[in-house]
Amino acid sequence: MTKKWQQIITVVKLIPAGKVASYGQVADLAGLPRRARLVSTALKANSNEDVPWHRVVNSQGKISIPISEASHQLQLSLLRSDGVVVNAGRVDLKKYRWQPSLDALLFELTF
DNA sequence: CTACTGACCTAAT
DNA sequence: GATTAGGCCAGTA
């Protein structure tokens, strides 16, 4: 577990239920611009209960996990239990995109 | 050390 | 919408 991963995980933990963020968005907030791919590897290594990894989708609002993976369905159901509407593996980003509050942004500065 | 792999992103067809 | 191409760069083998 590197420090970069910890920063990513920390940001993901800030995403409130009912909202989603994109990989790139998380990377930026974690102070790691252009590292969207690192977010995905960090998340897959930390798919446990205290990390709401399911609230992270790609820039199109779609679930990026391959259908072949069992966790694809898991993300789908977890999102729905959060109250997020998912159609064709996709959420409406205009509606559900997480907009970090000011205090959340200030918190990021402690990185 | 080199080579390959992505749960990515953007822009251009 | 869908697809392609290029860029990206930390992990992994």
Image (cartoon, coloured by chain):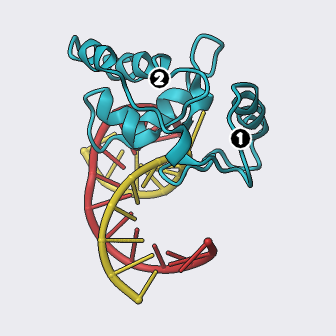
Chain colours: A cyan, B yellow, C red
**Quarter holding the C terminus of chain A?**
top left
Q: Could you say which is closer to the camera, residue B8 or residue C1? A: C1
Q: Which mark is residue A12?
A: 2
**The N terminus of chain A lies in which quarter of the figure?**
top left
Residue A1 appears in the rendering: no
Q: Position of residue A38 (x, y in %)?
A: 41, 36
**Quadrant of the rendered image containing residue A53:** top right
Q: Which chain does tag 2 point to? A: A
**Res. A34 image quadrant:** top left
Q: Nearer the viewer, mark 1 or mark 2?
A: 1
- Nearer to me, A111 or A2: A111
Left or right of A31? Residue C3 is: right
> Which image quadrant for residue A8?
top left
Looking at the picture, how far across and down is residue A23, in whole percent? 45, 40
First of labels 1, 2 by sequence position: 2
Q: Is residue A70 above or below residue A82?
A: below
Please state if A41 lies on the left or on the right of B11 as rendered: right
Amino acid type, residue under disc 2 in the picture: Val
Q: Residues within 10 Å of mark 2 (few under 14, many from 20)?
A: many
Q: In the rendering, at what x and y percent does residue A40 appear? A: 50, 37
Q: Residues within 10 Å of mark 1 (few under 14, many from 20)?
A: some
